[in-house]
Image: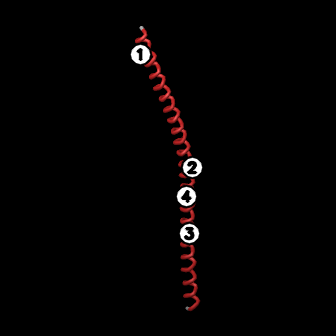
Amino acid sequence: DLLRRQAGILERLVKELEVQRDQAGDVLGGTAEQMDGQRELARTMESLDREVTEINESAAKLKEGIERIVIQAAELRQISEASRIAD
Protein backbone atom coordinates (compact mmCIF):
# COMPACT_ATOMS: atom_id res chain seq x y z
CA ASP A 1 0.00 0.00 0.00
CA LEU A 2 2.83 2.37 0.89
CA LEU A 3 4.60 1.58 -2.37
CA ARG A 4 1.44 2.31 -4.35
CA ARG A 5 1.03 5.67 -2.63
CA GLN A 6 4.69 6.52 -3.25
CA ALA A 7 4.31 5.47 -6.89
CA GLY A 8 1.20 7.67 -7.19
CA ILE A 9 3.03 10.62 -5.62
CA LEU A 10 5.99 10.11 -7.96
CA GLU A 11 3.66 9.84 -10.95
CA ARG A 12 1.92 13.12 -10.04
CA LEU A 13 5.31 14.74 -9.44
CA VAL A 14 6.55 13.63 -12.87
CA LYS A 15 3.36 14.94 -14.51
CA GLU A 16 3.72 18.28 -12.71
CA LEU A 17 7.37 18.48 -13.76
CA GLU A 18 6.32 17.87 -17.37
CA VAL A 19 3.73 20.65 -17.10
CA GLN A 20 6.33 22.99 -15.60
CA ARG A 21 8.82 22.04 -18.34
CA ASP A 22 6.24 22.82 -21.03
CA GLN A 23 5.39 26.14 -19.40
CA ALA A 24 9.08 27.02 -19.12
CA GLY A 25 9.44 26.22 -22.82
CA ASP A 26 6.52 28.50 -23.61
CA VAL A 27 8.04 31.30 -21.54
CA LEU A 28 11.41 30.80 -23.23
CA GLY A 29 9.77 30.87 -26.65
CA GLY A 30 7.89 34.05 -25.73
CA THR A 31 11.08 35.65 -24.46
CA ALA A 32 12.90 34.79 -27.70
CA GLU A 33 10.00 36.25 -29.70
CA GLN A 34 10.08 39.40 -27.61
CA MET A 35 13.83 39.76 -28.11
CA ASP A 36 13.40 39.32 -31.87
CA GLY A 37 10.70 41.99 -31.81
CA GLN A 38 12.93 44.36 -29.88
CA ARG A 39 15.79 43.83 -32.34
CA GLU A 40 13.44 44.49 -35.26
CA LEU A 41 12.15 47.62 -33.53
CA ALA A 42 15.73 48.82 -32.99
CA ARG A 43 16.51 48.28 -36.70
CA THR A 44 13.34 50.13 -37.68
CA MET A 45 14.15 53.04 -35.36
CA GLU A 46 17.70 53.22 -36.74
CA SER A 47 16.37 53.27 -40.29
CA LEU A 48 13.81 55.92 -39.38
CA ASP A 49 16.53 58.02 -37.75
CA ARG A 50 18.63 57.85 -40.94
CA GLU A 51 15.63 58.88 -43.04
CA VAL A 52 14.83 61.80 -40.73
CA THR A 53 18.46 62.92 -40.91
CA GLU A 54 18.36 62.78 -44.71
CA ILE A 55 15.10 64.74 -44.76
CA ASN A 56 16.56 67.37 -42.44
CA GLU A 57 19.67 67.69 -44.61
CA SER A 58 17.54 68.02 -47.75
CA ALA A 59 15.33 70.60 -46.04
CA ALA A 60 18.41 72.62 -45.03
CA LYS A 61 19.70 72.56 -48.62
CA LEU A 62 16.27 73.56 -49.91
CA LYS A 63 16.14 76.45 -47.44
CA GLU A 64 19.58 77.63 -48.57
CA GLY A 65 18.45 77.48 -52.20
CA ILE A 66 15.30 79.48 -51.41
CA GLU A 67 17.37 82.09 -49.56
CA ARG A 68 19.66 82.46 -52.59
CA ILE A 69 16.62 82.87 -54.85
CA VAL A 70 15.20 85.55 -52.54
CA ILE A 71 18.53 87.42 -52.59
CA GLN A 72 18.78 87.15 -56.37
CA ALA A 73 15.18 88.33 -56.77
CA ALA A 74 15.93 91.36 -54.60
CA GLU A 75 19.04 92.11 -56.65
CA LEU A 76 17.06 91.82 -59.90
CA ARG A 77 14.41 94.15 -58.47
CA GLN A 78 17.10 96.71 -57.60
CA ILE A 79 18.63 96.44 -61.07
CA SER A 80 15.20 96.81 -62.65
CA GLU A 81 14.39 99.86 -60.53
CA ALA A 82 17.80 101.39 -61.27
CA SER A 83 17.25 100.75 -64.97
CA ARG A 84 13.85 102.51 -64.86
CA ILE A 85 15.34 105.48 -63.03
CA ALA A 86 18.16 105.72 -65.58
CA ASP A 87 15.70 105.76 -68.50
The residue to which callout 4 is attached is 33
Q: Residues within 10 Å of mark 2 (few under 14, many from 20)?
A: few
Q: Residues within 10 Å of mark 3 (few under 14, many from 20)?
A: few
Which circle, 3 or 1, is nearer the viewer?
A: 1
Identify residue type, mark 2.
Arg
Query: Residues under labels 2 and 1: Cα distance?
Result: 57 Å
Labels 3 and 1: the sequence-earlier one: 3
The residue to which callout 3 is attached is 24
| Mark 3, secondary structure of its residue | helix
The relative height of residue 20 versus residue 52 in the rendered view (above or below) is below
Labels 2 and 4: the sequence-earlier one: 4
| Mark 4, secondary structure of its residue | helix
Say which quarter of the image contains residue 21. bottom right
| Mark 1, secondary structure of its residue | helix
Query: Residues under labels 3 and 1: Cα distance?
Result: 84 Å
| Residue pictured at 41% horizontal, 15% vertical | 81
Residue 11 rendering spot, x and y as whole percentages: 56, 80
Quarter of the image with the C terminus is top left
Which circle, 2 or 4, is nearer the viewer?
A: 2
Labels 2 and 3: the sequence-earlier one: 3
The relative height of residue 7 versus residue 59 in the rendered view (above or below) is below
